[in-house]
Image: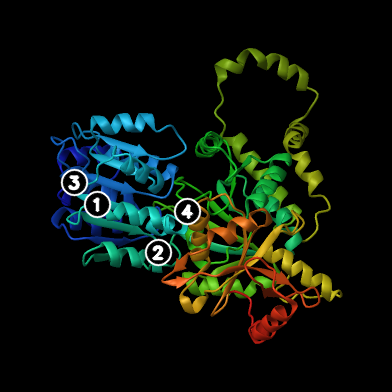
């Protein structure tokens, strides 16, 4: 087995990583570090999140940087402020004994003046988010004309978040002789496009099977009625008293409502979503990283780039529309050689989606039963007993109080004292779960007598709005589909890119061979229609229009961009698409 000592790293770097407890490289580090040290060839490195990619590119760059030259020599681009700060912190730790090497994180949501001042003094390695990096380049504060290394970390996530234009602009002003290192968990179409357009005959290195589930993650699912998702979530939290994880919801509104309910019910939880200011976001993340919060409720966009260690669980409150998103979610646990659990709360009509995820990830999903009241009470009881058994007793501090305590409790015998002690902490669980119903349903449970209501339930479940919030989405028709290699992630990226904002509620996305539908918060109707004018996807001019629902059939029809077709035009359009609608299939 190769060790860091055998990889040709300098004594200063080895001393730093040895102090951090790094002795044996991960698979991606073992493959990547020698390649960067020995060659200037461009490199595409594919590995799951949490496999040590920062050290994989950071260590060889630290070793080769010329600290006698004050100009910027390496530019590292990443999707979010949190990841930007984490990468900078890691590189500084790796370079602890490397004299005079300077590292600067640059990101939005904070005042630009300190970053301008630091750049003026000279910085060897800049780690930045695409938006702020491009801003600094345009201000002529960040000079990238002499960089030797350009690193794109989490390239797939940057594209998902709509940073395509910023990346194109930044890459276009960097020198052609640079070494480009692209790190990604998946090799999607957009990532491949960047590799083809801006990299010169790159070497491709992969650690494990790409676009698949991480090996250290166990995949489980619980089947309940859609209206019982929240109750199932509470039971899963109760039966795992040491849970430390992220709960993924579909929309910001759902995120806030689920978090508020958990807080009201006494759980250590909080929400992470686009409505938070940067200061509020930082505060939530500080509480979560310090484990004052056990559950972080988040949307996929808000959780992009979060780097949190030791997560025990990832919970899908709703399954994502795209299997690639599931891979990203589940990859946040089971990191650094530790075990993790990815849980999905599904309803009876989502069995086929589970089978699709199994095929996509190459992993078996185990069906578990939502625990009942007795099982939860037993688990919580023995967790409490374990805590009491292992607590450290400070004899000196409590000694003076003991005589009065003994006197007050002398009327209780040993058995009664234990019962009293347990009941103090345990009565609320016993009371709450005394008559708890069985939440489990079978995959073939379809006993609803009211067909119309069942259809409405399906619609609400697909939107992720069951009993939590109302239908406040507008459905749009988009003229690209699976034959154009469009995916849900592509469409989310297009929305973010076209609107220049990441604060829009996005609902259900349906993709068909030649066209797609997507839902966006109704307040943003005009913004969507205006933003997509003159936009293209892989050379195809995009046509976005509001889809009008047919009250009699429940189907959606395409309308014009201003939703003002004549009656004849609507009838022609209905005939045109009737065959397509009859062949529609549920995604997954």
Q: In front here: 88 or 384?
A: 88
Image position of 363 (left or right of 517): left
| Residue 174 badge | 1
How far apart are the two marked residues, 3 and 2, measured between alpha carbons? Answer: 30 Å
Q: How many marks?
A: 4
Residue 93 in the image, given as x and y percentages of width and height: 30, 37
Residue 260 in the figure: left or right of residue 221: right
**Position of 439 compared to 362: left or right?**
right
Within 10 Å of disc 4 (Cα), the crowding (few <14, some 14-19, many 20+) is many
Towards the viewer: 522 or 182: 522
Furthest-top residue in view? 400
Camera-nearest label, 3 or 2? 3
Residue hosting label 3: 146
Residue 426 on image: x %, y %: 74, 39
Q: Nearer the viewer, mark 4 or mark 3?
A: 3
Q: Residue at x 40, y 69 (%)?
A: 189
Q: Which residue is mark 4?
A: 332
**Gap in Å between the C-alphas at discs 2 and 4?**
14 Å
Mark 2 and mark 4 lie on one chain; the one further toward the N terminus is 2
Q: Is residue 224 visible?
A: no
Which SS class for mark 4? loop
Kindly state the secondary structure of the residue where label 3 is placed.
loop
Mark pair 1, 3: CA separation = 8 Å
Which residue is tagged 2?
186
Mark 2 and mark 1: span between their CA atoms?
24 Å
Asked which secondary structure carries label 2, the reply is loop
Q: Earlier in the sequence, mark 2 or mark 1?
A: 1
């Amino acid at each position: 087995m190769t060790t860091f000592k055998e990889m040709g790293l300098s004594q200063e770097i080895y001393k730093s990583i040895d102090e951090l407890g790094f002795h044996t490289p991960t698979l991606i580090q073992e493959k990547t570090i020698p390649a960067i040290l020995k060659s200037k060839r461009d490199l595409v490195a594919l590995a799951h999140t949490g496999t040590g990619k920062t050290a994989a590119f950071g260590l060889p760059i630290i070793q080769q940087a010329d600290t006698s030259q004050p100009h910027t020599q390496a530019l590292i681009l990443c999707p979010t402020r949190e990841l930007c700060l984490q990468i900078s912190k890691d590189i500084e730790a790796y370079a602890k004994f490397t004299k005079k090497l300077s590292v600067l994180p640059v990101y939005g949501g904070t005042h630009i003046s300190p970053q301008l001042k630091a750049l003026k003094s000279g910085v060897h390695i800049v780690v930045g988010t695409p938006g702020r990096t491009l801003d600094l380049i345009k201000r002529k504060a960040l000079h990238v004309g002499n960089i030797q290394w350009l690193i794109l970390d989490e390239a797939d996530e940057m594209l998902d978040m709509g940073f395509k234009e910023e990346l194109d602009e930044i890459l276009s002003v960097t020198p052609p002789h640079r070494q480009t290192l692209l790190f990604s968990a998946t090799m999607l179409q957009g990532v491949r496009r960047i590799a083809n357009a801006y990299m010169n005959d790159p070497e491709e290195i992969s650690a494990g099977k790409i676009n698949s589930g991480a090996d250290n993650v166990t995949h489980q699912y619980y089947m309940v009625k859609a209206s019982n998702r929240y109750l199932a979530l509470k039971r899963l939290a109760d039966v795992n008293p040491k849970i430390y994880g992220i709960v993924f919801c579909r929309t910001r509104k759902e995120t806030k409502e689920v978090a508020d309910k958990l807080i009201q019910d006494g759980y250590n939880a909080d929400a992470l979503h686009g409505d938070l200011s940067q200061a509020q976001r930082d505060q939530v993340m500080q509480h979560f990283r310090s484990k004052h919060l056990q559950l972080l409720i988040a949307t996929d966009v808000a959780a992009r780039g979060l780097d949190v260690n030791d997560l025990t669980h990832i919970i899908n409150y709703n399954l994502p529309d795209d299997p690639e998103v599931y891979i990203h979610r589940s990859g946040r646990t089971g990191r650094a050689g530790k075990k993790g659990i990815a849980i999905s709360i599904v309803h009876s009509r989502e069995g086929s989606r589970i089978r699709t995820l199994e095929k996509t990830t190459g992993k078996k999903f185990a069906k578990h039963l939502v625990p009942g009241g007795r099982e939860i009470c037993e688990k919580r009881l023995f967790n409490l007993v374990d805590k009491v058994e292992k607590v450290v007793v400070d004899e000196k501090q409590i000694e003076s109080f003991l005589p009065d305590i003994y006197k007050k409790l002398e009327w209780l015998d040993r058995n009664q004292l234990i019962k009293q002690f347990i009941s103090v902490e345990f009565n609320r669980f016993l009371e709450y779960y005394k008559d708890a119903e069985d939440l489990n349903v079978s995959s073939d449970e379809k006993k609803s007598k009211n067909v119309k209501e069942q259809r409405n339930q399906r619609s609400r479940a697909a939107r992720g709005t069951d009993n939590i919030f109302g239908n406040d989405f507008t459905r749009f028709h988009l003229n690209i589909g699976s034959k154009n290699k469009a995916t849900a992630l592509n469409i989310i990226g297009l929305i973010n890119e076209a609107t220049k904002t990441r604060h829009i509620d996005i609902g259900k996305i349906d993709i068909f061979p030649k066209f797609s539908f997507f839902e966006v918060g109704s307040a943003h109707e005009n913004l969507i229609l205006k933003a997509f004018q003159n936009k293209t996807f892989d050379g195809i001019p995009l046509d976005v229009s509001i889809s009008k629902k047919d009250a009699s059939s429940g189907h959606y029809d395409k309308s014009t961009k201003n939703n003002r077709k004549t009656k004849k035009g609507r009838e022609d359009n209905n005939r045109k698409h009737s065959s397509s609608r009859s062949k529609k299939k549920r995604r997954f």
